[in-house]
Image (cartoon, rainbow, N blue to C red):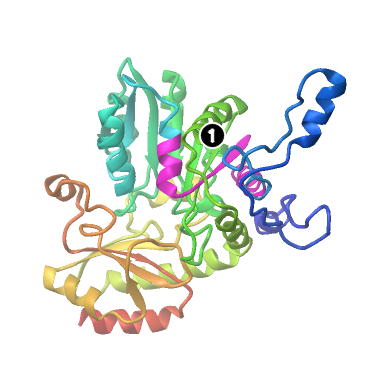
């Protein structure tokens, strides 16, 4: 079955009771368990039913969790109240004294939770340039339990060779975790390449309309799924059914949205590459991108996010202050184009000296291309960069 068809026909296209073309929204906090106790009269014990309290499970949430597991080719899926809740909950399967090797230019929120909350609880982390898999191998310690990757990376769009890193992880007996937010399962499916856990900020391309906060995780095996579920149920960082329903709706149009957005991103990134006020463009869809060959081998596209650097700080500030067809805002993946300023937004929590070492400078702007006509965006960008 074509992936675009699977987005719509994944087992949750119609309500089994009424035939409604859409997942039913179960807006409830608890469930009547009377039948279970009636059965106890005859059997002498209470038989547990599937749903008892909505933190532990909800039929609407189950539909989304089964959908993302199917799309990512995993055993179990889990929904959370935000992307960082998904990251934090997955990290919750580890214990004090464990060590994680992480890509050094992961999403700023992931960097922050590893270097503040989990660091205080004794979870150790070593950041490395994961675009060279040798760095991942060198950083492994006796107490290393996992590798945490993100490709393309945020915000410099570096590419990590997933198969090479998964081979290293498997040989060392490590759990491999991949943040797949930028690519979605439409363009890249890490579990098929050997990953153990995949994470999404469903706020972004999966939801797709900048109207919901949500996170998802998928495990390759049932065993890992039991561990993640224990954290999900224990922490309780779950989404409400309405947010879940919005993500389910967004997934249905992922293919048409992302394909159009990627087409626009390629055109705009190529145009920016020759602009007199642009120093560099970072996008794996460009022929001169150092990771293009690896990305082409493990993904079916380059995505709809790119970054560029202006030649001066004044040009970057002018762009963000005068651009009309792109919102100067946090987030990405919506139907509207968003221009983000990483040093003051997504990566503000990273110390300045570390940001500058990574190349996240005050002239760097990240663009998430929406569904506007790319020619209109180019004209607007050209005026803002003049």
How many numbered markers are drawn? Answer: 1
From the viewer's perspective, tell me whether residue 304 is left or right of residue 70: left
- Rendered location of residue 13, percent (x, y): 74, 57
Residue located farthest toward the right when viewing the structure as drawn: 42
Asked which secondary structure carries label 1, the reply is helix
Depicted 319 relative to depicted 99: above or below? below
From the viewer's perspective, tell me whether residue 72 is left or right of residue 359: right
From the viewer's perspective, tell me whether residue 358 is left or right of residue 367: left
Residue drawn where x is 36% and y is 80% of the image:
325
- Rendered location of residue 342, percent (x, y): 25, 58
Q: Is residue 168 visible?
A: yes
Q: Which residue is mark 1?
A: 233
Q: Is residue 164 visible?
A: no
Q: Is residue 82 magenta?
A: yes
Q: 218 and 5: which one is in front? A: 218
Characterize the magenta stretch by its predominant secondary structure: helix
Q: 329 and 316: which one is in front? A: 329
- Rendered location of residue 310, percent (x, y): 19, 68
Q: 24 and 365: which one is in front? A: 24
Quarter holding the C terminus is bottom left
Q: Which segment did they paint magenta?
A: 63-89
């Amino acid at each position: 079955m074509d992936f675009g068809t699977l987005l719509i026909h994944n087992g949750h296209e119609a309500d089994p009771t009424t035939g409604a073309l859409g997942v039913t929204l179960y807006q409830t906090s608890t469930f009547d368990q009377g039948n279970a106790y009636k059965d106890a009269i005859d059997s002498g014990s209470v038989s547990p039913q599937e749903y008892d309290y909505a933190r532990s499970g909800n039929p609407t949430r189950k539909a989304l969790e089964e959908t993302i597991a199917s799309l990512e080719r995993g055993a179990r899926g889990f929904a959370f109240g935000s992307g960082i809740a998904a990251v934090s909950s997955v990290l919750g399967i580890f214990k004090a004294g464990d060590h994680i090797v992480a890509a050094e230019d992961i999403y700023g929120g992931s960097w922050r939770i590893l270097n503040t909350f989990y660091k205080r609880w004794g979870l150790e982390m070593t950041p490395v340039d994961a675009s060279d898999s040798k760095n991942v191998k060198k950083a492994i310690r006796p107490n290393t339990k996992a590798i945490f990757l993100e490709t393309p990376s945020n915000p410099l769009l570096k590419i990590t060779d997933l198969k090479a890193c998964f081979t290293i992880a498997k040989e060392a007996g490590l759990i491999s975790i991949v943040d797949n937010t930028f690519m979605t399962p439409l363009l890249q499916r890490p579990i098929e390449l050997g990953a153990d856990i995949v994470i999404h900020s469903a706020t972004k391309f999966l939801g797709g309309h900048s109207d919901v906060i949500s996170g998802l995780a998928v495990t390759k095996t049932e065993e890992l799924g039991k561990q993640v579920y224990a954290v999900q149920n224990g922490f309780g960082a779950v989404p409400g059914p309405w947010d879940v329903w919005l993500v389910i709706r967004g997934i249905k149009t992922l293919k048409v949205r992302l394909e159009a957005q990627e087409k626009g991103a390629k055109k705009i990134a190529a145009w920016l590459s020759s602009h007199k006020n642009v120093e560099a463009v970072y996008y794996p869809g460009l022929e001169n991108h150092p990771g293009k060959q690896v990305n082409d081998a493990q993904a079916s596209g380059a995505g709809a996010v790119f970054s560029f650097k202006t030649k001066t700080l004044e040009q970057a500030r002018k762009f963000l202050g005068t651009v009309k067809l792109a919102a100067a805002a946090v987030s990405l993946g919506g139907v509207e184009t968003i221009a983000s300023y990483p040093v003051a937004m997504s990566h503000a929590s990273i110390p300045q000296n570390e940001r500058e070492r990574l190349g996240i400078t005050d002239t760097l702007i990240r663009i998430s291309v929406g569904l506007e006509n790319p020619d209109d965006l180019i004209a607007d960008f050209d005026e803002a960069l003049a």
